Structures are given as structure tokens and as C-alpha cells.
């Protein structure tokens, strides 16, 4: 079975990728060694830098993924800083920032970087939704309890893994990768 290495230390991301790529006949190995996430304006730049850094260190083909939550009322914050902001302000911090906001629109974006035979590709996925007034649910990870996709009545954290995969930014980016692999 062909193997693709996923450079991530995030179990949630790993299991989402496995659920989507293993049915196509790919085995997903994890590389947990990490890579520096440069400070950049876009997820694409972070992903490209990660690919360059891991080239030669991680067996090809390999992929990595950089994602973020972009809140309209906060001019796209936390965006590329999502990981840091989740670790510092957390979900409650985002809810406080939006306490007086009339428009809680937000989107998750995912950029997958993929390197095979020395060639690099990026694949993008997005999901539109809103930030809820309160955190709801306990499934998933990160900002899942405060993000409700536009197509749904529940937050990502109130969904089963299969339901989240139907809608998630990461699965949409993985779908682009799947098209490429096919
Ligand atoms: P990373 O830098 O790609 O690991 O992700 C940035 C941060 O965005 C993570 O620490 C999570 O807090 C958040 N994030 C990314 N994807 C998701 C998701 O699918 N659900 C909830 N939070 C996410």
C-alpha cells in the first residue's frame, strides 16, 4: 500500500486525514518531529516554508497542513496566528472579543502542502460559518466548540468525526489532494 507521511503532531488532524485517504488505498504515517512555523501573512507561505524545511528530512511523498480561523469582525484575526491564540486566549478569549459583535461570520481555511518527487503543491479548503455565543460540544479539537458551519445547526464539536468531515476546511483541502493523487 503506498505510504504518505503527514508531518503533524496533531492527532485530530491525523485521524481526519486517515479517514479520508485510507479508503483510497493510502497508508498515512505520522512524522511528529515538527517544523518551524514562520511568521508570515498567509497560510500558503507557512505551508511552503514547512515543505522546504522538511525536504530531505521526511520521506516523500509527504504532506503538512496549516489551518486557521478567520473572523470577519476581527479583520481576519486570529488567522495565521490561530495556534498561538488558541493556546493563549482559547475559545473563551475569542468569545469575549466578539461579545458585542452583530456579525459573527468566520471561516476556517486549510492549506495542505504536498511534496512528491521534489515537486511542491498546495491545496486549499474553506468552510464558512459563524462563531457561536457560547462554546458547545466536546468532540474535535481547537476552535471546534465555537464554530458552526453555515450548512449546520451544530458546532463542529457537536458533530461526529464523519459529520465534521462532510463540511470541514481540511477535508475540502484533502479532497483537492485526492483529485491530484487520482
Ligand atoms: P495549525 O497551525 O494548522 O496547527 O492550526 C492552527 C490552530 O487553528 C490550531 O491550533 C487549532 O486551534 C485551530 N484549528 C485548525 N484546524 C481546526 C479545526 O479543524 N477545528 C478547530 N480548530 C482548528
Image (cartoon, rainbow, N blue to C red):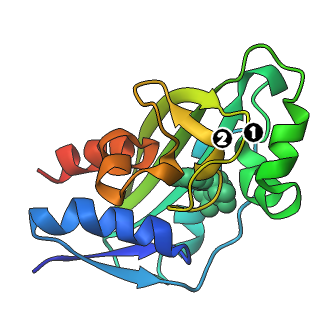
Would you identify the image quadrant in which residue 62 lies? Answer: bottom left
Instruction: State whether residue 57 is above or below residue 141.
Output: below
Q: Residue 119 location in percent, x, y?
A: 36, 57
Quickly name the residue at label 1.
41
Q: Residue 42 location in percent, x, y?
A: 67, 39
**Number of numbered labels in the structure image:** 2
Rendered-image quarter of ligand 1? bottom right
Q: Between residue 172 and residue 51, name the one nearer to us.
A: 172
Badge 1 marks a residue whose secondary structure is loop
Quickly name the residue at label 2.
69
Q: Is residue 124 left or right of residue 146?
A: left
Mark identifier at residue 111: none
Q: Residue 4 location in percent, x, y?
A: 28, 73
Residue 49 visible in the snapshot: no
Mark nearer the viewer, 2 or 1: 2
Q: Is residue 69 left or right of residue 14?
A: right
- Upstream in the sequence, badge 2 or badge 1? 1
Q: Between residue 89 and residue 137, name the one nearer to us.
A: 137
Q: Estimate how packed mark 1 is, as few (under 14), some (14 to 19) or many (20 or more) residues with alpha carbons within 10 Å.
A: few
Label 2, label 1: how far apart the Cα atoms are: 14 Å
Residue at 24%, 59% in the rendered image = 20
Would you identify the image quadrant in which residue 53 lies? Answer: bottom right
Q: Estimate how packed mark 2 is, as few (under 14), some (14 to 19) or many (20 or more) residues with alpha carbons within 10 Å.
A: many
Would you identify the image quadrant in which residue 54 lies? Answer: bottom right
**Ligand 1 within 8 A of label 1's CB?**
no
Q: Are marks 2 and 1 in contact (CB under 8 Å)?
A: no
Q: Is residue 112 left or right of residue 144?
A: left
**Ligand 1 within 8 A of label 2's CB?**
yes
Q: Between residue 163 and residue 6, name the one nearer to us.
A: 163
Furthest residue in direction top, as rendered: 102
Residue 26 visible in the snapshot: yes
Amino acid at each position: 500500500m503506498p505510504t504518505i507521511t503527514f508531518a503533524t503532531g496533531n492527532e485530530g488532524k491525523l485521524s481526519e486525514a486517515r479517514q479520508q485517504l485510507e479508503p483510497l488505498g493510502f497508508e498515512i504515517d505520522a512524522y511528529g518531529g515538527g517544523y518551524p512555523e514562520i511568521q508570515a501573512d498567509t497560510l500558503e507561505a507557512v505551508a511552503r516554508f514547512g515543505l522546504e524545511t522538511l525536504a530531505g528530512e521526511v520521506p516523500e511523498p509527504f504532506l503538512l497542513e496549516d489551518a486557521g480561523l478567520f473572523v470577519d469582525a476581527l479583520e481576519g484575526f486570529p488567522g495565521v496566528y490561530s495556534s498561538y491564540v488558541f493556546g493563549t486566549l482559547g475559545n473563551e478569549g475569542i468569545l469575549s472579543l466578539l461579545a458585542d459583535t452583530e456579525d459573527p461570520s468566520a471561516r476556517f481555511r486549510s492549506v495542505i502542502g504536498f511534496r512528491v518527487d521534489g515537486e511542491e503543491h498546495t491545496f486549499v479548503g474553506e468552510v464558512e460559518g459563524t462563531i457561536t455565543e457560547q462554546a458547545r460540544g466536546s468532540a474535535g479539537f481547537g476552535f471546534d466548540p465555537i464554530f458552526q458551519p453555515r450548512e449546520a445547526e451544530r458546532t463542529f464539536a457537536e458533530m461526529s468525526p464523519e459529520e465534521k468531515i462532510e463540511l470541514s476546511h481540511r477535508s475540502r483541502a484533502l479532497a483537492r489532494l485526492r483529485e491530484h493523487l487520482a
